Every structure is written in structure tokens, then in C-alpha cells.
Amino acid sequence: MIDPQWREELGPVLRTLQIIVGALTAGSVVFLIIAMILAGGIAAAADNPPILTYTALGFAATILLVRAIVPNVIVATGRSQIAQGTWKSPGGHQANGAFSAMLERMGDAGRLVIINQVRTIIAAALLEGATFLLLVAYLVEHSWISLSVAIMFILALAMHFPTRQRLVEWIENQLALLEQERQFGE
């Protein structure tokens, strides 16, 4: 049976993650605005092929592939380590005694919260990096394709903004998978 007490402890962790994802999104939006203002007054060079745009689009496609794989590997590895009893908290979480005590009270849910933080930050940072390169390509080459894809990436980044309900549902799903892994020894 899964102890539901961990839900009471989510506030500070959720707020931290919201600040991080919000800052990544806000930084991308601010850079978008700056790029649009700066590019608006400069005529595009029609003679040169948009090499930087093509490079940025290739990089963005690669990032989407990496983003589809890496966060899932992080979750599966962390969950497996929890099931085997070998999971260790990242060093930053050991420094704050109150935070460590809260995670300890939460048990497996607390460990999964940390894994969720790592997963979310990595996925969001990948999108932010691609967004910045696309916006640089737009600044240099005035390519509307770069601008359009950058805006789509910003929207995808904003969709990473964590809510309490999504976090609770994710943890509950992961706890169920964790129990299955423990039962079947996977």
C-alpha cells in the first residue's frame, strides 16, 4: 500500500521546479522579443543560402530526438535504482538538511520527485538551447522558418511548466511502476 502523506510535502519542491521552468521559458521569450526587434530593422541578405538556419534546424531535430530518449532513460534508471535500493540523491540535495529530511519523510515518492526534477530540467534545457540557436539563426539570416520553429519550441518549453496535479499523477504512475519492478525483480 502506498502512503499518500507525500502529497502534503510537494509544495516547496513544486515551487522550485516552477521557478526553474518559468525562468527558462521567460529567458527564451525575452530573447525572442529582442531578436524580433533587432531583426526588424535590418534587410535580409537574399544572395546567401541560410546555412545557419539549416544547421539550427538540424540541431533542433536532433534535440527533439535526444529529448524523446534521455529523460525517459533517466526516469527508468532512477526507478530501477530505487527498486534495487541503490539510488543516491544528487549531491545538491544532501546539503540542505531540511530538504533532505522532507525527502526522507516522503520515502520513494521523495526520490521520484528528485528524478522528476532532473528529468524536467534536462528536457526543458534541451528545448531552450535549441530555441536560442534558432533565434540566433533568425537574427543573422532573418529566416522566418527559424523564427517559426523557435516559437514552437518556446510553446513546447512552456508546456513543461509543472502543476501540482500533473506532478501527483506522474509520481503515482511511477510508484505503481516501482511496485511492479519490485514484485517482478526487473
Image: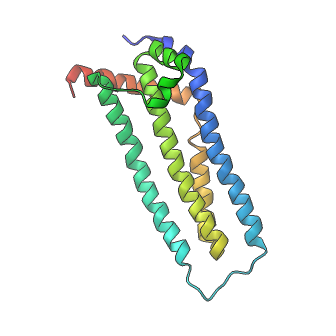
Extreme residue toward the bottom, this view: 47
| Rendered position, 39 above or below 183 | below
Can you tell which quarter of the image residue 139 is in?
Answer: bottom right
Res 169 seen here? no
Q: Quadrant of the C terminus?
A: top left
- Answer yes or no: is residue 16 visible: yes
Residue found 47% across the figure and 64% down from its top: 59
User: Would residue 186 be found to the left or right of residue 137 on screen?
Assistant: left
| 99 vs 184, nearest the viewer | 99
**Rendered location of residue 35, percent (x, y):** 71, 64
- Colour mapping: rainbow
Q: For this view, does 163 lie left or right of residue 92?
A: right
Query: Which is more toward the observer, 23 or 40?
Result: 23
Spot occupied by residue 3 in the image (x, y as percentages of width and height): 43, 10
- The spot of residue 167 in percent (x, y) is 52, 28
The image quadrant of residue 172 is top left
| Side (left or right) of 14 relative to 173 | right
